[in-house]
Image (cartoon, rainbow, N blue to C red):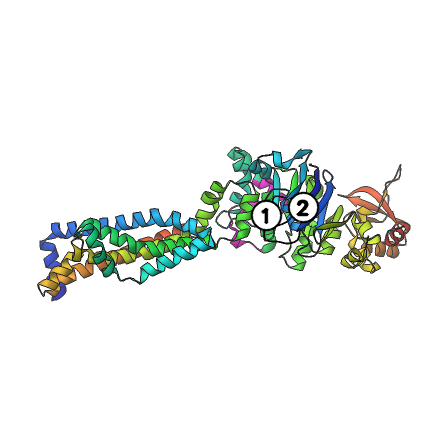
């Protein structure tokens, strides 16, 4: 039974599996952290100007069209076969959903609400932190959720360029024609993605605007 | 109470060939209720928003209690002016209580003081604090949102209140109720109120004085009664429907035409009418009772008398 074989394979190398999981999580965390740190401020800026928004959103969408694997391989000439190359390539994948959602979230805040905030005597900093950001947060979190799932799945490919992670089981299983090894990677990544989906769903509920 | 003065105020928006507000000079007395009335695009909202500097005039000066508002810090100015806009502009992610607390918090009030103030204000606008404090705007009807909007604007006890078509998006029945409420609250709070509307009946009903605007200019600035009986031109005459006498009577408040209370007046069985009621109701009461005049009550205390002659005189403007 192939599932059992897979489990046995992983259990016999539990140290290696844990290290792969850790690498995978670090890759995802680094990509998301950079993505959020970059895209939330950029999305806020772009939402303030029609022309900037047009340029930024179209570039982000363009980025989305390039296949994940292509981005990973494109990183090799610059960063070699390394964790850094994989992390940076994954960051590129995390950018579009966060950026596009942040821009849209800020753009759709009702003008009346902002006008009321300014009219009541809030400074632009107060309007941003107390009004706009909380109102935009649900949509931004949805963007982060999409990015998280995308990056968890794509981080599997990092193994192809020496970035480690749970993808090593897939490359290994492929090389040894052993599907049970391949499944160790596939099932682990699937479970990780599901867990992230559930967790991020919880965060979404936390920041939702009551209605 | 705050007095407001506009001196030769104009505003031309960028990319626009005409002045949205054109050389407006206007004095608003302390504690008066002044309505800016006119068709859409006449510049009334622009004029209003120049008071809290959401729009800066291209020419002219505005004075609040004698101080040029440009000399004041813009956020400090706004925090001392209550601001109510169409559909409330309530913050959807904050509860009713948190919405009302915004300006007091900006001003650094103590929590206990803010808490007490929220309860007082919700009672003023007739929403039960126990029930409504923790609600979110999306859980309220349009009329309730507007009440919260008013409570929020009054939170830090501003002496001047700016209201930009506050009842514009509300159904007719609720709007009438809110207008009644507005009249009651106006008497209770004693503040200067600048109120924008394109609804003539609303203006006639609420205003102490009406500013009729057309194409950025002030056409007439007068009491509702004078606007109806002595419109300065055809534009005003048609706008307020000054030729329809019965309608006119239904639009003028008793308080604006009554005579002062005579000396040694005793209520003693005299037919009465509320000061906020309209002349049409007063007339039918006079005809029904056959009394020579009605005693005018405000909060159940006599404040004046109203005779048939007075109503006739008001209708003809003499």
Chain part drawn in magenta = B118-141
Badges 2 and 1, same chain:
yes
How far apart are the alpha carbons under marks 2 and 1?
Answer: 29 Å
- From where the camera sits, is residue A99 visible? yes
Mark 2 surroundings within 10 Å by alpha-carbon count, few (fewer than 14), some (14 through 19), many (20 or more): many
**Chain under numbered label 1:** B
User: Residue drawn at (34%, 60%), measured in percent from left and top?
Assistant: A62
B125 inside magenta stretch = yes
**Which quarter of the figure is the N terminus of chain A placed in?**
bottom left
Image side of residue A171 versus residue B317, left or right: left
Whole-percent x and y of residue A20?
16, 52
Q: Secondary structure at mark 2?
A: strand
Residue pointed to by mark 2: B10
Residue pointed to by mark 1: B149
**Quarter-of-image position of residue B77:** top right
Whole-percent x and y of residue B85?
60, 49
Task: Work out whether mark 2 precedes mark 1 in sequence or the reverse, and give the earlier one.
Answer: 2
User: Residue drawn at (79%, 45%), measured in percent from left and top?
Assistant: B297
User: Residue drawn at (71%, 48%), measured in percent from left and top?
Assistant: B35
């Amino acid at each position: 039974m192939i599932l059992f074989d897979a489990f046995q394979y992983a259990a016999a190398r539990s140290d290696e599996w844990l290290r792969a999981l850790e690498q995978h999580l670090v890759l995802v965390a680094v990509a998301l952290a950079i993505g959020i740190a970059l895209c939330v401020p950029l999305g806020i800026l772009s939402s303030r100007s029609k022309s900037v928004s047009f340029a930024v959103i179209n570039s982000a969408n363009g980025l989305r069209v390039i296949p994940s694997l292509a981005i990973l391989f494109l990183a090799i000439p610059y960063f070699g076969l390394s964790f850094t190359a994989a992390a940076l390539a994954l960051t590129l994948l995390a950018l579009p959903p966060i950026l596009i959602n942040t821009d849209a979230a800020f753009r759709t805040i009702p003008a009346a609400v902002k006008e009321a905030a300014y009219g009541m005597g809030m400074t632009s900093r107060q309007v941003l932190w107390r009004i706009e950001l909380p109102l935009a947060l649900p949509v931004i979190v949805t963007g982060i959720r999409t990015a998280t799932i995308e990056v968890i799945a794509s981080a599997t490919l990092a193994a192809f360029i020496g970035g480690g992670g749970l993808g090593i089981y897939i490359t290994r299983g492929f090389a040894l024609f052993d599907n049970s090894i391949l499944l160790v990677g596939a099932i682990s990544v699937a479970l990780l993605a599901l867990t992230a989906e559930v967790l991020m769903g919880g965060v979404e509920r936390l920041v939702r605007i009551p209605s | 109470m705050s007095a407001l003065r506009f001196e030769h105020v104009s505003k031309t928006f960028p990319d626009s060939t005409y002045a949205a507000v054109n050389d407006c000079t206007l004095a608003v007395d302390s504690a008066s209720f002044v309505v800016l009335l006119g068709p859409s695009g006449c510049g009334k909202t622009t004029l209003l928003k120049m008071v809290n500097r959401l729009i800066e005039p291209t020419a002219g000066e505005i004075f609040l209690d004698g101080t040029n508002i440009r000399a004041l810090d813009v956020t400090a100015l706004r925090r001392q002016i209550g601001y109510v806009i169409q559909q409330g502009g309530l913050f959807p992610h904050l509860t009713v209580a948190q919405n009302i607390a915004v300006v007091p918090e900006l001003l650094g009030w103590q929590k206990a003081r803010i808490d007490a103030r929220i309860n007082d204000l919700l009672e003023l606008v007739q929403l039960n604090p126990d029930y409504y404090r923790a609600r979110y705007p999306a859980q309220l009807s349009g009329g309730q949102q507007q009440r919260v909007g008013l409570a929020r604007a009054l939170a830090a006890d501003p002496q001047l209140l700016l209201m930009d078509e506050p009842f514009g998006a509300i159904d007719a029945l609720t709007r009438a109720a809110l207008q009644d409420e507005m009249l009651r609250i106006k008497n209770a709070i004693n503040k200067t109120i600048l109120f924008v509307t394109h609804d003539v009946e609303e203006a006639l009903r609420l205003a102490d004085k009406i500013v009729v605007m057309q194409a950025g200019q002030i056409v007439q600035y007068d009491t509702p009664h004078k606007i109806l009986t002595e419109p300065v031109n055809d534009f005003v005459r048609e706008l307020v429907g000054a030729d329809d006498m019965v309608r006119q009577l239904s639009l003028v408040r008793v308080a604006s035409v009554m005579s002062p209370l005579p000396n040694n007046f005793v209520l003693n069985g005299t037919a009465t009418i509320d000061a906020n009621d309209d002349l049409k109701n007063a007339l039918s009461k006079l005809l029904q009772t056959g009394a020579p005049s009605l005693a005018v009550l405000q909060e159940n205390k006599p404040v004046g008398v109203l005779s048939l002659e007075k109503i006739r005189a008001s209708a003809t403007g003499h």
